[in-house]
Every structure is written in structure tokens, then in C-alpha cells.
């Protein structure tokens, strides 16, 4: 996914230097958007960047690129409408729900509307800055100067000297995501929703650091060798920080994997060994469970089972709506973390604990400390 984005950005920059809009960049932007909805922002910003050379006028070439982009995305939109009845992927509605601007406007929730405009974008920006600092503190400190350098590039021969796509993406993405889809922030699970911004942060930070070295004052009495080698020292420090970060993330990733294996995969193995092959399993975390258990899976949060979203009411706990849905589909087992659905986990007449997996040691990535398999007893009197 990130390769599609990086390839599209690179081709856009090459096209900028050659003063034409790359068809391949448009195609890669569209394919990236098929992979992750976050990438939908890239193409409009690329068009806006290119249109600066034409005083923001829409040309025949621009229309061709828009048509190409829409043609690539059309099958996905048709599929979404056919499966879920809505144009965006079902994961958007399951995760974002009513927290974004669309939900706030639909429900006439003015408090939520103010949050989507004034609060969530600030949170997204703040977390993106923290993520950049965690990845490489030196480049993060130099990034503002890099953005200023790119945005302040002077005109050359009547055209803009530098493409603004990279700074536009870095500045606008957290703002727009905070307004449209404020589900989790850039720090969530090691930046999984902003991974595509990390290479751009590195580029902007490197530009800022190079600019800082150029602007650094030279003391007359300082040895010439100091100035000769300062760039080597600074860039070496950048790579040392990267090496430290990779080492730390590597160890953390290992603990993350072990934790998922101890809870979710072990639970899936238990389901495979202890339930009939025709059993229906309901859960809120269906990835490993569905893959390793070989059972039919019902998703309680709606990522792969859109129907459950029809049972959920905005602003109310999900327990009641999920229970109503489960009564309709009557799964044989319900596997959940009790902290996710405290009301359901206490209904001992309906959900009887059969097995559980727990986090061994300090929790690093799992959404709870316990994952419990409940046998479901469906009696309309319960």
C-alpha cells in the first residue's frame, strides 16, 4: 500500500520537474485509494498542486485524469453500495461511526460537530508530531524548517519552483482526518493509520536539517575541520537515532506478535479443536480467529458483517444492540474481551464461559487482558 503511495508521489514530483501531469501517478494514487481510504486525499492535492501552474484553471488534461481516477475507483464504490448500501468501505462506518463530521451533520449533533472542527484535528496533529519525534527526534525538530523551506520556495521563470504536494499532505492529512474520520490517532498501534506519512516526514526533516546546516553561523575562531565534518557528525547522528528506533521497535514488535499468538491464535486453535466444524462463532476480533479456526465467523463490530451496524444506536453502549443482533443470528459461541462488552459478559444465563486466554506479562498491543470463549444459550426467555 505504501509503495503505491510513494510511487505516485515520486511520479508526481518527476512530472512536476518535466511540467506535465503523470498518468501513471494518477493510476497509482487511485490504486492506493483502493487499498486504504486514507489515500483518497492524495489525488485531489496532486491536482491542486499541478493547477498552481495554470492559475487553478481546469484544463482538458485535468478532466482526463479525473475521469481515469474515477474509473479505477468506480468498481469499489459499486461493490460497497451492493454489499453495504453505502459508497465508502464498510470499515469506515464500523470504526468511525458517528464521530466524524458526516455523523455529526446527519444526527444534528452540534457538540460533536464542534469537536470535529476544533478538537479532533488538533489531537491528530499533536499525535503526528509525537510519532515523528519517536521515529527520529532530530529530523522531527528539523521538520518545521523543512516545511518552511518547501513552502517558501521562490518562483523560477514564471512557475513555482517546487512542488508542494509533500507539505500539503503532511499539513492537511491530520486536519482532514480529524474532521472526517477521527478514529484513533497517529500513535495508535505504532502509527498504523499514518504509516504512509513516515517517509514524507523523513524527507521534510532531511530538507530542514540540510537547511539548518546551511544557515548555521560559522565562528571565525573555530577550526576549519569542525565545519568540514559537522555534516558527517549530524547525519551520522540521524542514522544512529534510526538504528536505536529500529532496535526498540523490533523488540516491541516481537512482544506484540507473541501477545497475539498467546491470545488470539491460541484461542483460534482451541476453537478448532473443541467446537463442531459447523459452529458459528461471533467475536469482535475476527482476523486470527477466522483464519486459524476454520469456522464461520460473525463480526460483532461490523467490519466484515455490515448488518450488525443496523442494530447499533448513536451515543448508546453497544451491548444492547449487539445482543439483539446475536439473538437474531444465534451463534454457537461468542468470543470477546469482557471489558469490551461488560453488560454481555455478565449475562451468565446466556453466555457461559468455556475457555479463556490471558496476556502473559505486560500488555503491549492487545485490546484487553482476557479473551473469553462463551457458549451461547439461546432461549427467548433469557
Image (cartoon, rainbow, N blue to C red):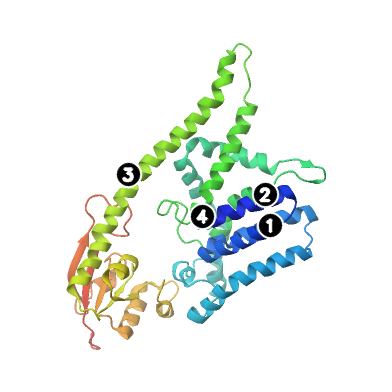
User: Mark 3: which secondary structure?
Assistant: helix
User: Mark 2: which secondary structure?
Assistant: helix
Cβ–Cβ under 8 Å for marks 1 and 2: yes
Asked where in the image residue 223 lies, by quadrant, the reply is: top right
Residue ID for mark 4: 2
- Mark 4 vs 1, N-terminal side: 4
- Mark 2 vs 3, N-terminal side: 2
- Mark 1 vs 2, N-terminal side: 2
Q: Residues within 10 Å of mark 3 (few under 14, many from 20)?
A: few
Counting from the top left corner in percent of width and height, residue 297 is at: 32, 75
Instruction: Give the quadrant of the C terminus.
Output: bottom left
Q: Residue at x 73, y 49 (%)?
A: 18
Query: Rounded to the nearest whole Å, what is the CA distance between mark 1 and mark 3?
Result: 41 Å
Q: Residue at x 60, y 55 (%)?
A: 8
Disc assigned to residue 251: 3
- Mark 1 vs 3, N-terminal side: 1
Residue ID for mark 2: 14
Above or below, 133 against 102 in this view is: above
Q: Nearer the viewer, mark 4 or mark 1?
A: 1
Cβ–Cβ under 8 Å for marks 4 and 3: no
Q: Nearer the viewer, mark 4 or mark 2?
A: 2
Amino acid at each position: 500500500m505504501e509503495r503505491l503511495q510513494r510511487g505516485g508521489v515520486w511520479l508526481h514530483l518527476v512530472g512536476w520537474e518535466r511540467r506535465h501531469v503523470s498518468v501513471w501517478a494518477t493510476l497509482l494514487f487511485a490504486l492506493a485509494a483502493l487499498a486504504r481510504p486514507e489515500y483518497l486525499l492524495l489525488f485531489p492535492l496532486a491536482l491542486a498542486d499541478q493547477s498552481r501552474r495554470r492559475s487553478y484553471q481546469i484544463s482538458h488534461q485535468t478532466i482526463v485524469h479525473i475521469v481515469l481516477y474515477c474509473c479505477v475507483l468506480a468498481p469499489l464504490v459499486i461493490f460497497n453500495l451492493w454489499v453495504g448500501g453505502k459508497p465508502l468501505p464498510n470499515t469506515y462506518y464500523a470504526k468511525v461511526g458517528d464521530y466524524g463530521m458526516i455523523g455529526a451533520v446527519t444526527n444534528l449533533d452540534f457538540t460533536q460537530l464542534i469537536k470535529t472542527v476544533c478538537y479532533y484535528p488538533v489531537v491528530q496533529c499533536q499525535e503526528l508530531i509525537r510519532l515523528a519525534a519517536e521515529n527520529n527526534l532530530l529530523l522531527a525538530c528539523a521538520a518545521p524548517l523543512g516545511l518552511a523551506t518547501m513552502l517558501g520556495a521562490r518562483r523560477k521563470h514564471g512557475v513555482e519552483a517546487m512542488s508542494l504536494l509533500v507539505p500539503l499532505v503532511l499539513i492537511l492529512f491530520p486536519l482532514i482526518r480529524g474532521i472526517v474520520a477521527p478514529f484513533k490517532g497517529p500513535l495508535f498501534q505504532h502509527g498504523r493509520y499514518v504509516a504512509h506519512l513516515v517517509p514524507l516526514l523523513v524527507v521534510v526533516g532531511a530538507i530542514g536539517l540540510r537547511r539548518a546546516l546551511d544557515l548555521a553561523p560559522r565562528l571565525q575562531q573555530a577550526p576549519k575541520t569542525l565545519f568540514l565534518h559537522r555534516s558527517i557528525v549530524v547525519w551520522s547522528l540521524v542514522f544512529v537515532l534510526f538504528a536505536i528506533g529500529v532496535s526498540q521497535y523490533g523488540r516491541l514488535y516481537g512482544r506484540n506478535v507473541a501477545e497475539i499468538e498467546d491470545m488470539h491464535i491460541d484461542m483460534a486453535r482451541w476453537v478448532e479443536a473443541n467446537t463442531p466444524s459447523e459452529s458459528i462463532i461471533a467475536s469482535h476480533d475476527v482476523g486470527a480467529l477466522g483464519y486459524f479456526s476454520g469456522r464461520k465467523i460473525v463480526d460483532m463490530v461490523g467490519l466484515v458483517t455490515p448488518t450488525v451496524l443496523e442494530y447499533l444506536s448513536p451515543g448508546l453502549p453497544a451491548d444492547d444492540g449487539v445482543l439483539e443482533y446475536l439473538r437474531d443470528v444465534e451463534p454457537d459461541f461468542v468470543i470477546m474481551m469482557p471489558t469490551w462488552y461488560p453488560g454481555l459478559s455478565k449475562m451468565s444465563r446466556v453466555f457461559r464461559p468455556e475457555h479463556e486466554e490471558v496476556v502473559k506479562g505486560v500488555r503491549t498491543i492487545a485490546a484487553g487482558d482476557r479473551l473469553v470463549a462463551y457458549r451461547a444459550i439461546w432461549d427467548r426467555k433469557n
